[in-house]
Structures are given as structure tokens and as C-alpha cells.
Amino acid sequence: MLLFSIIVYLIITVVIGYWASRKVKTSGDFMLAGRSLPLLLSSSALFATWFGSETVFGASSEFLKGGLYSVIEDPFGAALCLLLFGLFFARKLYSMNLLTLGDFFKVRYGKRTELVASTFIVPSYVGYIAAQLVAMGLILNVVTGLEIWQGVIVSAVVVTFYTYVGGMWAISITDFIQSAIIIIGLLVLAVILSQKAGGFANLLNEVQPGTFRFLPKPEFKEIIIYLAAWSVLGLGSIPSQDVFQRVMSSNSVNTAVRSCFIAAGLYLTVAMIPLFISLCVRHLYPEFISGDTQLALPSMVLSHATMPVQILFFGSLLSAIMSTTSSAILAPAAIFSENLVKPLTKHRFSDKKLLMITRFSVLGFSALATVMACLRSNIYELVGESSILSLVSLFAPLVFGLYWKRASSTGALMAMVMGTTTWFVVNRFDLTWPSLVPALIVSILIMVVGSLVWKDKQVV
């Protein structure tokens, strides 16, 4: 019955994607849903940005190991990103009427910077997509007994298909439906487990000391590590195409801003539910956390929950992960076609051909991520690495480009290259400090110095 329900759910998702494809006439429809999403669809799409494997599997696993302090990166950093984007970025970027984030670098710094920035944006998504595919592979492994790599391939085929045909329209419509399933499924499971554990108060009385520690110790090194954890998604995902495309798909600038705030609050609230469920699992069924803690929740549900609860839980899991995966696949495909292929081919492709190239790019990036997903399995690490690359290369050029008139293309190019280089070099040393800290500092300093020294560079 459970397997049958999952198959039916996947089929319905594909049908919705195919139906949404009727709305796709231009590359703008495919990438940004024609900039026509109302507040409800826009908010649900933004909420679904990261509410996938890293929240349900990764964060709950880390929470079981180290408590609340170990999940600052996600969900707290992710919610911070949406809040900051709504406060400082959504209004300015929306008014520029851009199709991709790469277009910002073209308009602000010139075509050369557009190409370089796009080459930094695209690779960061492969690991992120892989993380989502690993999670779906884990689900199918638990439910059907398929090898994880086989589940990865099956999942990739389904998500890639409806993203390929429907683009952002398919993503937005399925996100709305999937968000409702996520919230209902997790709430039902949380209530049932809480009752079994003797109530919320009884559960909290038995948690291990330090589980809810949120602030760092008053030591300089620990404070830096703490701030770095906030920065991975909190700052690193601001210069990301998937957040950009979801916000810019809104039907107005006010909708874009409001949806960021609504999604931030919703994300932080709903993301607490998997953490609470993991506490229930440790209290009721400690045997499930002795092995791979990423499998603790699905294994427990499969062993002890009733069939309706299993269907709700695994339906919510698939919903969360598929909604995140689809936009993550579309993001690099949009950048690749619009900001790499289009300028390098001297704009000789018609919009119809560009749409075709974008769709084939969806297939290509999905294939790359599938290979990576078959080779690596730590979801939390895959997600973190993808955001750090954006942070150390693109954050400073984006912020200074929006808020500092003297920011130059040379400064932006140097910041991208030197920030990334510093990150790679520092990563080779076994340091106890996060490598993103010196890399981000270098990127910011180089951005400022480069812009002041080569201030004669003209903005194209």
C-alpha cells in the first residue's frame, strides 16, 4: 500500500508538471513563470527552497548528535537568508527586471564579469542537487529495498522530467501542493509521537543537557565558528539563482518582498518539527539512532507507524525533497543558457532555441548531479559546500554592486577569483577554523581595494 501510494504520488507530480508546460511559451515563462506568481504561490515556492533533505534528514541527524547548536546553518541560517533577501535585495533586484542572477553582473559590471560570475554560480548547484537525490534514494531504499544508487536514478528521472517540461511554472504549482503535504504530514507525526512520549513537557524533561544550547561560549574562536555557521546559508545563498528565480517570479515587487518574510517565518517554524520528531525518536526508539542517523526518522516510521501515518510521512518527505530538487536543477540550467551560451554565441539563437537549450541543460545538470549522488552520501556536507562557494565568490560583488557606486568590474572579478582561491588553498590545511572565514574576508577586501585602484573601469 505504501509503495503504491508513492508511485501514485510520483505520477500525479509528473502530470502536474506536464499540465504546467502548457503555460510555457518563452524562456521567461520557463525560468521565471512569466513573473506572474501571486503571494500564495510565491511564498510557498520560497518556503520550499531549502525545505528538503538537509532539513528533514540532515538537520535532524545533526541535531541528534549535537543539539540545537549544531543546526545553526540550517534551519536558522536558511531563514536568515530569506529575511535578509527581503530586507535588502528583493526590491532592488526586482526593479531591474532581470531574467537571471547572471544578468545582474552583466548590467552592473559588464559582459566579461557576467561570464566569470556565471561560471562560479553553475558548479555550486551540482552538489546541492546531489544531496536531494541522495535523500530520495534513501527513502526508496527504506520503503522498497532498492539500492540507494538505484533510488537516486529513479528519483532523478521523475524530477527531471517535470522540470524539463514545465520549468518554473511546474515548480511553483507543485511547490504549493507539496508545501501543504509537508506541513500536514510532519504535524500529524509530531502529535502522534508526542502523545506516545507522554506529552511535550515530559519529553523536554528527559532531554540531554546542552540539547537546547543556542549561543556560543564567550571565546573568540568559537564565536567566529558560530558566525561562520550562520553565514553558510544565511549569506552564501543570497547570491544564488534558485532564491533569485523564486523571488523574481512574483507578480509585483511588493509580492516579492512580502513572500520573503512569510517564507522565512514559515520555514523556521516548520523546520522545528523534524527536530522535535527526532527527539521523540530518541526517547521512544533509541535503537534507530545507533547507526546512520540520517535514516532514523524513516526507519522508525516504517517500523512503528500505522499505514496512514506512513503515507503522510513519506509523502511529505518526497514533497519536500522534490520541490527543492526541481528548482535546484532549473537554476544552473538557466544561468548556463542565458549567461554563458547566449553571450558566447553572440545572441544568434532565437528565444525558442534558447528555451530548447535551457531544457537540454536541465538534463545535463541532472545527469552530473546523479553521478555525484551515487558517489557521496552525506547530505548536510553536500549542501554546505554548495553554499560556501557562492559566499566566497559572489557575495561581495553582489552586495557592493547594489550598494556602492564605485564598485568596479575589476574589483568584482578579483574578488571572485581571490575569494575562491583562498578557500581552496585554506581547505588544504587541517585548520580548526572554517575556511570560509579567511576566504570571505579576502573577497571583501579585494573587492574594495580593486574598485578603488581600478576605479576608471566603466559600468556597462
Image: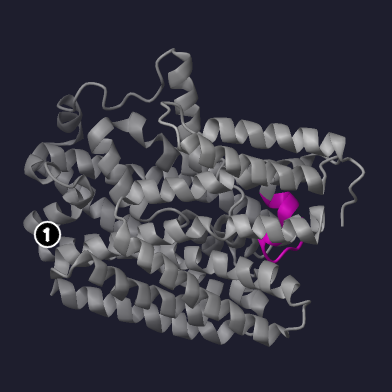
Q: Nearer the viewer, residue 338 or 321?
A: 338
* Horizontal side, residue 315 vs residue 203: left or right: right
Q: Please name the residue that numbered disc 1 is placed on.
A: 302
* Horizontal side, residue 265 vs residue 253: left or right: left
Q: Residue at x 63, y 77 (%)?
A: 29
* Horizontal side, residue 296 vs residue 156: left or right: left
Residue 113 in picture, x, y percent from top left: 75, 55
The disc labelled 1 sits on which kind of residue? Leu
Q: Quadrant of residue 350?
A: bottom right
Residue 432 in picture, x, y percent from top left: 41, 26
Magenta span: chief secondary structure: helix
Q: Residue at x 26, y 27 (%)?
A: 211
What element does badge 1 sit on?
helix
State which region is magenta. 90-102
Q: Quadrant of the C terminus?
A: bottom right
| Residue 82 in view here | no
In this rendering, is residue 129 above or below 8? above
Q: Nearer the viewer, residue 349 or 295?
A: 349
In this rendering, is residue 24 above or below 377? below
